[in-house]
Image: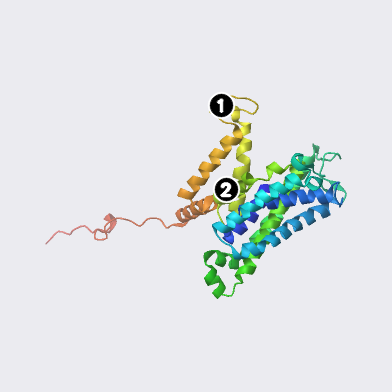
Amino acid sequence: MAAAVGAVGLGLLTGTAGQLSLGHAFFLAVGAYGYVWLAGEPGPGLPTAVAAVLAVLLAGAAGGLFSPVAGRVRGIYLGVATLALVFLGHHVLLTADSVTGGFNGRSVPPLEVGGFSFSSDSDLTLLGVPFGAEERLWYLGLALFAVTWFTACGLLRGRPGRALVALRDSETAAAVMGVDVSRYRSAAFVVSSMYAGLAGVMLALAFRRVVPDYFGLVLSVDYLAMIVIGGLGSVAGATAGAVFVTALPLLMTRYADQLPLVAAPGTTDGAVGPTEAARYLYGAAIVLTLLFAPDGLHGLVRRLRARLRHRLTAPPPADTASPSQPPTSAVRAKEPTP
């Protein structure tokens, strides 16, 4: 669910607004480490709920600081500029020991909202089922993802969404229609950064410890793969791509002993490990998507649904009998000539 939230934010930026970004991992790190520092020691030690909100706003502020560049640079040049953020952020995470903990990272304080803790320290049982930290975080992630889904869909249906689509298709035509190009490009970057910050907070709560090596270039490529496989410019497509990319390594690990050429975790049998095999598979999925389904899984499902609806609602085929030959019942018997 954290990956889905981050993928929806990147989908708004790259798929809807048409701005290539390879620095999504940087804003995920800002959200994760911002929460850890604001809620932990050393740090201000704020209430965890307040720290989570401020971490999302901090990620949006980081996107706002970069938005002047996003408002003036486009295409591959914007991708290279955002790529620089990943390397710069990784260097800062390694060297700012007092804030980030350096190479070893920092432990994540559990979230508490209104006295309810999302940790396993307190016992909670509902209908005879114990709810530990994982179960509580699962429902929290579900609620946050639902909010993300509805806000993103509302944004796309409204005037800002139409302006971003016009911006992606043609900046000149959008400017002629009255769209403030620089303003909307910058706003898209800020909104996407806030979504990434929320995803970073969710990842930190799930991992319980954040380390700099996780927020590298590979993570940015993973998120780019999510929106390409799922479908650019679609909230449902970004969600489907996030599920595919994040669930595939877990499934490969679970069934590694039953798959050929895949080594089970902790063994040296097989050609590759489950994580590497999963990367090969979704790399192949990207190639197949670009070749045969450029609009991703969402577009493929939409076409299949339209084809099925057409088959169900199509009228039955007309009678192919020749109109010059009347039905047998209509042919009158020839009367004898007197």
What residue is drawn where x is 70% and y is 61%? 65
What residue is drawn where x is 24% and y is 60%? 324
Report the amino acid beneath label 2: Ala
User: Residue 272: which quarter of the image?
Assistant: top right
Q: Residue 291: in sight, yes or no?
A: yes
Q: 6 or 77, which lies in front?
A: 77
Q: Residue 233: in sight, yes or no?
A: no
Alpha carbons under labels 1 and 2: distance apart: 26 Å
Residue that carries the numbered disc 2 in the rendered image: 225
Q: 98 or 292, which lies in front?
A: 98
Q: Position of residue 13 (x, y in %)?
A: 61, 58
User: Residue 326: which quarter of the image?
Assistant: bottom left
Q: Position of residue 108 (x, y in %)?
A: 80, 44
Question: Is 67 left or right of 169, judged from the image as shown?
Answer: right
Helix, strand or loop for disc 1: loop
Q: Position of residue 243 (x, y in %)?
A: 62, 45
User: Residue 147: which quarter of the image?
Assistant: bottom right
Answer few, some or many: residues within 10 Å of disc 1's Cα (few below 14, many 20 plus, some between 14 and 19). some
Helix, strand or loop for disc 2: helix
Residue that carries the numbered disc 1 in the rendered image: 270
What residue is drawn where x is 57% and y is 48%? 225
Question: Is 37 left or right of 267, judged from the image as shown?
Answer: right
Q: Which disc is residue 211 wearing?
A: none
Q: Quadrant of the C terminus?
A: bottom left
Q: 97 or 290, which lies in front?
A: 97
Report the amino acid beneath label 1: Gly
Q: 235 or 22, which lies in front?
A: 22
Q: Position of residue 170 (x, y in %)?
A: 52, 67
Answer few, some or many: residues within 10 Å of disc 2's Cα (few below 14, many 20 plus, some between 14 and 19). many
